[in-house]
Amino acid sequence: MHDVIYSAGYFVLELDGTLSGVLKEFEGGGVNAAVIEDLTAPGPYVKKHIGRPNYEDLVLELGFSMSRELYDWIEASWARKDVRKSGAIALCDPNMDARTRHVFKDAVIAETTLPACDASSSDPAYLTLRLAPEYAHAEKASGRVALFQSGRQKTWLRSNFRLQVDGLDCAWVSKVSPITVKQRVVADPIGELREYVREPGRLDFSHIRVTLPEAHAESWVEWHNDFLIRGNCSQGREKSGTLEFLGANLQDPLLRVQLSNLGVYRLGYERDAAGPQVRRVVVDLYCERMEIECAKSLGAAASESPGVATLDVGARAAVTWPPQRV
């Protein structure tokens, strides 16, 4: 019996003909169809055939070393601008030789997830995008993908964040839950077309959970009492704020999320893992609208680096290739 050796590879994203960078993870992109049974067909067996193809979403996990065009696309999707992109995801071996390409056409960003913030964590943080394409297929690929190192890579840790909410003491906030923005995508069937046209709909912003020590939560408790218990919850009593993801120097924001129309709908207490004598306040907020702004220093413009992608050395993808026999 031979031993089996597996090698890790890379997922490389291409947008509108230009390489955008290396993804940390990639999944999805399948194509399926419903099986239709024709019960009226003659014969002793049920006649079956397939319906229209359904193109499954592509899920990408990425850091802050992609091209500027990708971050611009994310900003546009949060601003409800109907921006569609076509491209491919190349699966490359450890030598950066392309083996397979997952091609997609006229995709919209159906979902963006920002990672949870945790002041005690040293883990790197990544964005997750869900793309909804109108058409997709896989094809064989060949050739080497050219990569370059465009200066110092942007490091993003879950602990590097800063939350600010009008009138509230946020200096002691230790955790902020993940934020998910969903773009409702509606299939628009057209009789003469085999593929459905997919149109973007309303934006839905997730709730936010904030955790901080009870000893420093006085302003949060007072807002909760006034807004929820006393019923002073009109739009004028809602708050605005920002959540910033910071670079390694804890000063320069890599990404800023503007939070509008914040309201508190729950405040609770929990024991801290550090000891039973420490209690933390957990505050649940709704948010009607968010805007995202990525730092202009992120990414390289396609015009500055045509045909190449930025290599994120920390984004080693979990790809296994056919085993080598030894």
Image (cartoon, helix red, strand yellow):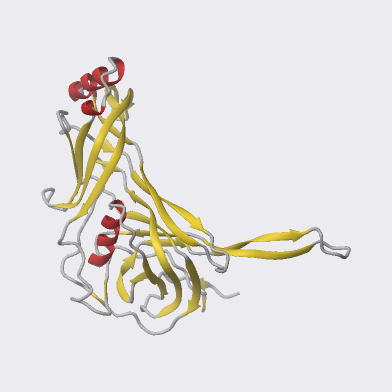
Q: Where is residue 295 in the image (x, y as percent from the top left)?
A: 17, 57
Residue that extends furthest to the right in the rendered view of this protein: 44
Q: Where is residue 281 in the image (x, y as percent from the top left)?
A: 28, 25
Q: In this view, does 120 lie to the left or right of 29?
A: left
Q: In which quarter of the image is residue 285?
A: top left
- Quadrant of image for the N terminus: bottom right
Residue 219, placed above or below residue 192: above
x 20%, y 35%: residue: 240
Q: In which quarter of the image is residue 63?
A: bottom left
x 74%, y 59%: residue: 37
x 28%, y 33%: residue: 210
Residue that extends furthest to the bottom in the rendered view of this protein: 143
Residue 175, placed above or below residue 27: above
Is residue 119 something that shows in the picture?
Answer: no
x 38%, y 47%: residue: 202
In front of the other: 111 or 212: 111
Residue that extends furthest to the front in the rendered view of this protein: 191
Q: Is residue 34 left or right of residue 237?
A: right
Residue 252, placed above or below residue 240: below
In front of the other: 147 or 109: 109
Question: Tag count in the figure?
Answer: 0
Q: Position of residue 300 (x, y in %)?
A: 20, 69
Is residue 245 something that shows in the picture?
Answer: yes
